[in-house]
Image (tube, rainbow, N blue to C red):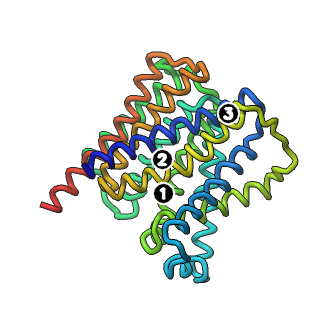
Amino acid sequence: MRNAIGYIVTVVAALCWGASGVSADYLMTSHGVELTLVSFFRMFTAGILILGCALARSRRITPQHRELVTTRRNWLPLVSYAIFGLAACQLSYMSVIRASNAGTGTVLQYLGLILIVVWVCLSHRRWPRASELIAMILALIGTFLLSTHGTPGALALTPVTLAWGGVAALTLATYTLLPARLIAAYGAELVVGYGLAIAGAGVGLVGRVWRYSITWTPDVILAMTITVVLGTAVAFTAYLWGVDRIGPVRASLVGCAEPIAATVFSALIMGSSYTGADIVGTALIVSAVVTISVVDLIRARRVTQ
């Protein structure tokens, strides 16, 4: 039963993340809401919600919480994570969505997980394993199909889309790798909560979001709620619950439903069209991530046996 609940809440997290990209796309495309304003609301509000939930659950500021914010050596890595990880990842992701659609943006961003494999190989000074090579090849072929529709020499995605997609992938890898020490010491909830709040405040100040206005119609309120509450605060909390119940490897495997969800939601809600080459390319990129996750799961089982 515990495992079943873990799988369910992890799927919910993936669906919420997939829906958040589509709702952000809707806000920017249909209502002209500025990218920096959407990013500010999403990160800052979600950060406050996550920290509020952490405080409500513990009913006090725990010693671990106090140590995170009062220890000076934590400030630089936390701020670096917020700026170069969360803020950079969010802004580049929103930029690739604005240049294409939520489905394509999410799939291109997922290439960052392959970059993490490359980084691990380089940092450990080893050659990629067979499974990792297969994943890289699948990801490269998938990217080729997405960007050319299978026709060499013809770009189906604009250079701007590909450029922002590359930045989104790189910053996803950065966002994943930067906070490793802090999360190991203080837990993901506190680190990501403060990271999101700092990143949101930074984007708000640098982007001077007070210059922009939003007409709060019912559909805008709904889309913003999905983007901020469901797509960030609820998704992150559900994913953490899933990790606690089924483990990080299985959770990351189930999380591969996110780009699929984003693609389906984008087609249904925004009317985005996809060719056969797009669908095959998306499937190959998702398969690349699944390959890595499955091999990690097998290794983890062997270690525990």
Q: CA distance from mark 2 to mark 1?
A: 9 Å
* Residue under numbered circle 1: 176
* Residue under numbered circle 2: 112
Mark 2 or mark 1, earlier in chain: 2
Q: Residue at x 51, y 41 (%)?
A: 17
Looking at the rendered structure, the kind of residue marked 1 is Thr
Question: Looking at the picture, does residue 76 appear above or below residue 142?
Answer: below
Mark 3 or mark 2, earlier in chain: 3
Q: Quadrant of the C terminus?
A: bottom left
Classify mark 1: helix, strand or loop: helix
* Residue under numbered circle 3: 98
Mark 3 or mark 1, earlier in chain: 3
How packed mark 3 is, by other alpha carbons closer than 10 Å (few <14, some 14-19, many 20 or more), is: some
Q: Residue furthest right?
A: 211
Classify mark 2: helix, strand or loop: helix
Q: CA distance from mark 3 to mark 2?
A: 19 Å
Q: CA distance from mark 3 to mark 1?
A: 23 Å
Q: Residue 239: percent from the left, percent from the top?
A: 43, 51
Looking at the rendered structure, the kind of residue marked 2 is Gly
Asked whether 4 or 161 is in front, the reply is 4
Q: Residue at x 58, y 81 (%)?
A: 73
Q: Quadrant of residue 140?
A: top left
How packed mark 1 is, by other alpha carbons closer than 10 Å (few <14, some 14-19, many 20 or more), is: some
Task: Say whether marks 2 and 1 touch (CB < 8 Å).
Answer: yes
